[in-house]
Amino acid sequence: MANEAKPCPCDIGDRMDYGGLGQEVQIEHTKAYVVKPSSASDKAIIVIQDIYGWQLPNTRYMADMLAANGYIAVCPDFYTGKEPWGPSHDWSKFQEWLEDRKPTNINKEVDAVLRFLKEQCGAKHIGAVGFCWGGVATHYLTLQYPDVKAGVSVYGIIREREDRYELKSPTLFIFGEKDDIIPLDQVSALEAKLKEKCTVDYQVKVFPGQTHGFVHRKREDINPTDKPSIQEARADMLNWLNKYM
């Protein structure tokens, strides 16, 4: 049962009815959704899931969009078979659920995916895009992995690491103005500290009126007033990757 007194603010939004153009493969100890562009490419993006898991159709739609723009896209199961969060779960137990699914404890999976992309896909330029939980994970990758040449963290930031402003790769941070999970004071603090400590290119962009999940959990056709922001954020993501990869 969901906790009605304290419902999960990380609403699933508009769940797409979408099958995906790629295929599921085994990558060492975990599974992944992989989709390749129509012509050969040596550029790849690790697409990192939100709390609803690697099989969420919305995330696969984003992977397919990246592939349509010339990137090999791989969306691994970073929970390695553990149950993703669900809309009916009790939000009061979220921290307990998160304990063995921390977005900063993914080195084994990242290492496996990097090997797969380099050895089996011929990738020479690798970036990362993540949403919510995956936004935090993307922030982590841009701190820890020089092989990741560019990152786009969509409504996700690391809060607890001392080195969280010392980016190694150019990173775009996208937020919604009305995000209850990441309030604007945290966004402002991030931007101020990056300005002080970061030595690589970065951008922090806030979309007026938008809530958590707007880039990948809303659809232009059923959220017409949000359509400009959705499309602009997705274009920003692609432009950032194109610039640095």
Image (spheres, grey):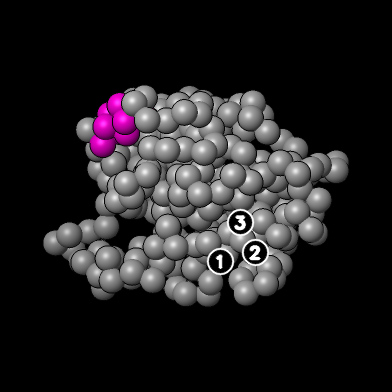
In the drawing, does residue 232 fall left or right of residue 122? left
Examine the image and state in which quarter residue 109 appears. Answer: bottom right
Q: Amino acid at mark 2?
A: Ala
Mark on residue 108?
A: 1
Residue 58 seen by the camera: no
**What quarter of the picture does the N terminus occupy?**
bottom left
Secondary element type, mark 1:
helix
Left/right placement of residue 128 relative to residue 124 reads left
The one nearer the camera, 180 or 224, is: 180
Circle 3 is placed at which residue position?
75
Q: Secondary structure at mark 2?
A: helix
Q: Nearer the viewer, residue 102 or 38?
A: 102
| Contact, mark 1 vs mark 3 (Cβ under 8 Å) | no
Task: State if disc 1 and disc 2 touch (CB < 8 Å).
Answer: yes
* Kind of residue sitting beneath label 3: Cys
The Cα atoms of the two marked residues, 1 and 3, are separated by: 15 Å
Spatial CA span between label 2 and label 3 = 12 Å
**Residue 190 included in the magenta stretch of the image:** yes
Say whether residue 122 is magenta. no
Cα distance in 3D space between marks 2 and 1: 6 Å
- Residue 194, image x and y in percent? 37, 30
Marked residue nearer the N-terminal end (1 or 3) = 3
Tell which tag, 1 or 3, sits nearer the viewer: 1
Q: Look at the image and give the residue range highlighted in magenta.
A: 186-194
Pick the residue in front: 231 or 17: 231
For label 3, the SS is strand
Residue at the (67%, 44%) spot, across then down = 126
Residue at 26% of width from left, 32% of height from top? 189
Q: Position of residue 18 (x, y in %)?
A: 61, 54
Q: Which residue is depicted at the point 25% across and 43% down? A: 180
Report the side of 43 relative to 78 (left or right): right
Q: Earlier in the sequence, mark 2 or mark 3?
A: 3
